[in-house]
Image (spheres, helix red, strand yellow):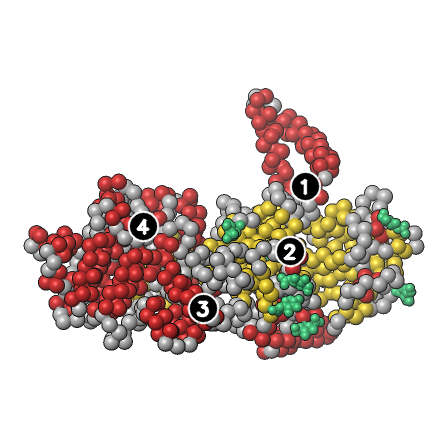
């Protein structure tokens, strides 16, 4: 009793110590390091492996034979491979588990010859609890460590070694060690599959590859969790000029991820694309890995920008087997603009028929002349299948398969014949036959799923922040909005009510609660949100998360302090905006739209551009809100919008009304309407006015045509608008409002022209938050530092003109 208490106390003290000085590394609660067959303990680095003879309770076996090898391997842990335990019958190792949760199970194998046992001929299976780790396993030469991670939910772990018929089993050393809870996620996003998420809680994982990019191996002594990270060189495709970077001192850990996710020696080295070699180069970095087909793999990408000199925009595309993991991974945003901050991302991929898993990382914007493309580390973990197995020999050996199937069929046949007796009286033959096939299926499932949970339940907790899509529990939202208090309503729209909310970490959010949806709508809603949450841009209102529990359809956005542009234009007591401010807001909104239209392979059409959807932050910087959601599938549409036509009256593309076809140019039309709204400071439709004035567009276009636009400018702007900038502004707006979409400019063109108008207004006022990139470049030629430029534009990923300017600058610098 006393001893137990002391140990518990010690653990308590050590975990407090660990909390205080995190740099000490992870201190596992369960730590069983065993060297098998050796009479003495052995030391590897600062870890002591205890002889399996020292504690008889661990090993229960009918026959134990220890072996001893004098063969020398050069590995630092070679001492572990010099003895072995040999089993001629089924044998168990049982380890007490004090802390439930994920544990490493590491198995060390190296065959040698001992007293008539040639270990190269051994053939055996290993299982842990209900999981098959190895089946009919053979190792003929060399040495090899197999690493698994298991969620152990009982107070002991049983490892079972079963020799094949007429053969025997062996093991050189083994480890059972606790992992930090947060190392393996409870679920992860799946790629290329209908299911969005895969629950990992009850799955066993096997480390297939753990690779450090940058051509350097990281040994277990340099890893808090004693992991080996091998150099990526053998896997790397060498076209596209990969180079290695090493800058370990540049790695800056924040609260998450910690060093337990990957050590500084992993985040501090990278393989990057050497884009200076070939200026027109637009390639990917690609690695190929061998995997067993028929399994799902958890792939973890480690990024840390030790490559860039300054915080210039950095958006990557990440692929597995040519499928997008992310088509715009905005690392700058994800690492809060701090260089050297580690970031990691998980994805699950099913590999069906190929024996390769190919990972590629490339630039997001093909127009960037010097793309920054790199990767710091990669882990590939095989996920146990529905039979609880990690072994692929079942898939491979067809003989065995036939055997098993025949056995199963015979068993089932007997079962079904028995069952049939009960049903014979009332079932016809044909129906019975159908039942036979059905029974085979369900029976198989029952057997295979034994002890496993295969369905995701609804009550999953909040995703960790490292994920692409953030799903919130309903209760968290109730709490944030004071149970949807009427006092917190900040808006009501077609989608539903919008509440102001405060999350537990004091983040202010806007919570949009839509009408509930049908079952099918749910998957689409999730997919849509996850897709949209990848669109990150300075001029788009950031999507923080969503909730689809209990048929709710809730979207959580960042909170915009100053509300909508509409409020500031008319019909309220808000102070008036200056002409420069208004231009800046138009430029910002155009940038946001431009990014939506061009930021990914498939253009996102906003569908509801209007002044009420252009929001202003505390600095009056414009951000486009409500994008894309309207694009959701028909299931959702049916429930929350009754008519086929989307968008708002007065802003609608007339061509859309006649042809029912939405294009990016429909957004351009609506944007033109907003421009006149901004200029004239009046609502788009105002029924209280004389007939010819009711519709802003008709009215403004008439004055535009007569060349007397100055007469309808918002009186509050009197004296502020220069004639040539007014002329240009009016022209752009009129072009946007062309009847036929082909005659309208792209948002990119509109943006360019608006920046020009802003330039015409001169640079006297200082209130502009949306300075034109080329203006900054002009500055630069008169020698402002590169760093300043990049800081100024950090996070502003507006696109083509931006990157061209930057590329131009780098060229200048390099001369
Ligand atoms: C293994 O064999 C070597 C000689 O080859 C011997 O020195 C050593 O003590 C042996 N170890 C065990 C555990 O039997
Ligand atoms: C042990 O078995 C392997 C594989 O069957 C064989 O190649 C090797 O020669 C054997 N070694 C001895 C010493 O019998
Ligand atoms: C382990 O399994 C338990 C029970 O299913 C679950 O509550 C827990 O979250 C799991 N832990 C991990 C790390 O997956
Ligand atoms: C990695 O290192 C090896 C040997 O040091 C070298 O041959 C190879 O070219 C390097 N690869 C890269 C991508 O630098
Ligand atoms: C650990 O990393 C440091 C810094 O990179 C290096 O100097 C040291 O040799 C490494 N230790 C081992 C055991 O690899
Ligand atoms: C890349 O790796 C090679 C071999 O490991 C090394 O000689 C070279 O210095 C490394 N280059 C950089 C930039 O770290
Ligand atoms: C990068 O890889 C992806 C996926 O394999 C491919 O679709 C794309 O064309 C590649 N890009 C280049 C420039 O090779």
Q: Which residue is mark 4?
A: 664
Asked if disc 3 and disc 1 are in contact, CB closer than 8 Å, the reply is: no
Q: Earlier in the sequence, mark 4 or mark 3?
A: 4
Q: Position of residue 184 (x, y in %)?
A: 59, 60
**Figure quadrant, ligand 6:** bottom right
Q: Earlier in the sequence, mark 4 or mark 2?
A: 2
Measured in 3D between alpha carbons, the distance from the residue under mark 3 to the one under mark 1, in whole angstroms, is 53 Å
Measured in 3D between alpha carbons, the distance from the residue under mark 1 to the one under mark 2, in whole angstroms, is 25 Å
Q: Which residue is mark 3?
A: 810
Which mark is in front, 3 or 1?
Answer: 3
Q: Which residue is mark 2?
A: 235
Secondary structure found at label 3: helix
In the rendered image, is residue 288 in sight? Answer: yes
> Which residue is at a point 72% across and 56% down the rendered structure image?
146
Residue at the far right in the pictured view: 115
> Which residue is at a point 79% across and 51% down the rendered structure image?
139
Mark 1, residues whose alpha carbon is within 10 Å: few (<14), some, or many (≥20)? few
Residue at the far left in the pictured view: 690
């Amino acid at each position: 009793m006393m001893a137990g208490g002391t140990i518990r106390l010690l653990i308590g003290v050590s975990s407090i110590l660990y909390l205080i000085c995190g740099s000490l590394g992870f201190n596992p609660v369960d730590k069983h390091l065993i060297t098998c067959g050796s009479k003495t303990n052995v030391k590897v680095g600062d870890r002591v492996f205890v002889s399996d003879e020292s504690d008889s309770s661990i090993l229960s076996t009918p026959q134990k034979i220890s072996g001893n090898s004098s063969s020398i391997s050069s590995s630092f842990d070679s001492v572990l491979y010099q003895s072995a335990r040999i089993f001629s019958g089924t044998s168990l190792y049982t380890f007490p588990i004090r802390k439930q949760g994920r544990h490493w199970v590491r198995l060390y194998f190296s065959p040698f010859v001992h007293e008539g046992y040639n270990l190269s001929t051994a053939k055996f299976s290993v299982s842990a609890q209900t999981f098959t780790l190895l089946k009919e396993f053979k190792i003929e030469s060399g040495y090899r460590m197999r690493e698994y991670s298991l969620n152990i939910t009982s107070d002991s772990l049983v490892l079972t070694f079963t020799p094949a018929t007429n053969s025997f089993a062996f093991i050189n050393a083994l480890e059972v060690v606790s992992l930090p809870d947060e190392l393996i996620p409870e679920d992860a996003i799946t790629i290329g599959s209908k299911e969005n998420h895969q629950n990992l809680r009850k799955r066993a994982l096997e480390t297939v590859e753990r690779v450090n990019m940058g051509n350097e191996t990281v040994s277990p002594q340099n890893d808090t969790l004693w992991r080996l990270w091998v150099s990526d060189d053998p896997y790397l495709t060498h076209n596209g000029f990969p180079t290695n970077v090493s800058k370990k001192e540049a790695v800056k850990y924040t609260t998450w991820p910690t060093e337990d996710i990957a050590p500084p020696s992993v985040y501090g080295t990278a393989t990057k694309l050497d884009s200076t070699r070939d200026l027109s180069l637009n390639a990917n970095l690609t690695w190929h890995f061998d995997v067993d087909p028929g399994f799902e793999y958890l792939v973890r990408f480690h990024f840390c920008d030790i490559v860039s000199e300054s915080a210039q925009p950095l958006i990557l595309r990440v692929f597995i087997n040519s499928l997008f993991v992310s088509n715009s991974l905005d690392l700058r945003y994800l690492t809060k603009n701090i260089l050297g901050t580690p970031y990691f991302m998980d994805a699950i991929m099913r590999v069906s028929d190929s024996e390769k898993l190919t990972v590629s990382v490339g630039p997001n914007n093909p127009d960037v002349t010097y793309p920054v493309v790199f990767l710091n580390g990669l882990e590939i973990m095989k996920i146990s299948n529905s039979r609880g197995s990690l072994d692929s020999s079942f898939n491979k050996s067809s003989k065995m398969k036939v055997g098993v199937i025949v056995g199963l069929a015979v068993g089932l046949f007997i079962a079904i014949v028995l069952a049939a007796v009960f049903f014979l009286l009332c079932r016809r033959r044909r129906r019975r036959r159908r039942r036979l096939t059905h029974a085979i299926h369900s029976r198989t499932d029952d057997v295979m799923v034994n002890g496993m949970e295969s369905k995701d339940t609804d009550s999953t907790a909040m995703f960790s922040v490292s994920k692409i899509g953030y799903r919130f529990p309903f209760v968290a939202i109730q709490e944030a909005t004071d149970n949807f208090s009427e006092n917190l309503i900040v808006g009501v729209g077609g989608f539903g009510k919008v509440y102001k909310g405060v999350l537990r970490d004091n983040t202010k959010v806007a919570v949009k609660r839509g009408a509930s949806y049908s079952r099918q709508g749910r998957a689409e809603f999730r997919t849509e949100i996850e897709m949209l949450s990848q669109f990150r841009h300075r001029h788009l209102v950031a999507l923080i998360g969503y909730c689809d529990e209990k048929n709710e359809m809730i979207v959580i956005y960042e909170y915009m302090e100053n509300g909508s542009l509409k409020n500031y234009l008319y019909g309220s007591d808000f102070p008036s905006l200056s002409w420069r401010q208004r231009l800046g807001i138009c430029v910002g909104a155009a940038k946001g739209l431009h990014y939506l239209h061009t930021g990914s392979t498939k253009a996102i059409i906003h569908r509801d551009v209007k002044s009420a959807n252009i929001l202003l932050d505390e600095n009056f910087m414009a951000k486009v809100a409500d994008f894309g959601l309207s694009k959701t599938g028909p299931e959702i549409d049916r429930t929350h919008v009754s008519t086929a036509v989307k968008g708002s009256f007065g802003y609608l593309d007339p061509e859309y009304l006649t042809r029912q076809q939405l294009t990016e140019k429909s957004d351009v039309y609506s944007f033109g309407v907003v421009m006149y709204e901004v200029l004239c400071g009046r609502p788009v439709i105002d029924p209280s006015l004389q007939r010819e004035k009711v519709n802003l567009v008709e009215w403004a276009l008439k004055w535009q045509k007569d060349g007397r636009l100055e007469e309808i400018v918002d009186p509050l702007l009197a004296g502020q608008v220069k004639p040539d900038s007014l002329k240009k502004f009016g022209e752009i707006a009129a072009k946007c409002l062309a009847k036929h979409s082909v005659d309208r400019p792209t948002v990119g063109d509109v943006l360019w022209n608006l920046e020009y108008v802003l330039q015409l207004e001169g640079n006297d006022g200082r209130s502009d938050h949306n300075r034109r990139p080329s203006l900054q470049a002009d500055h630069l030629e008169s020698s402002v530092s590169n760093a300043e430029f990049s800081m100024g534009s950090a996070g502003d990923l507006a696109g083509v003109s931006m990157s061209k300017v930057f590329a131009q600058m780098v060229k200048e610098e390099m001369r």
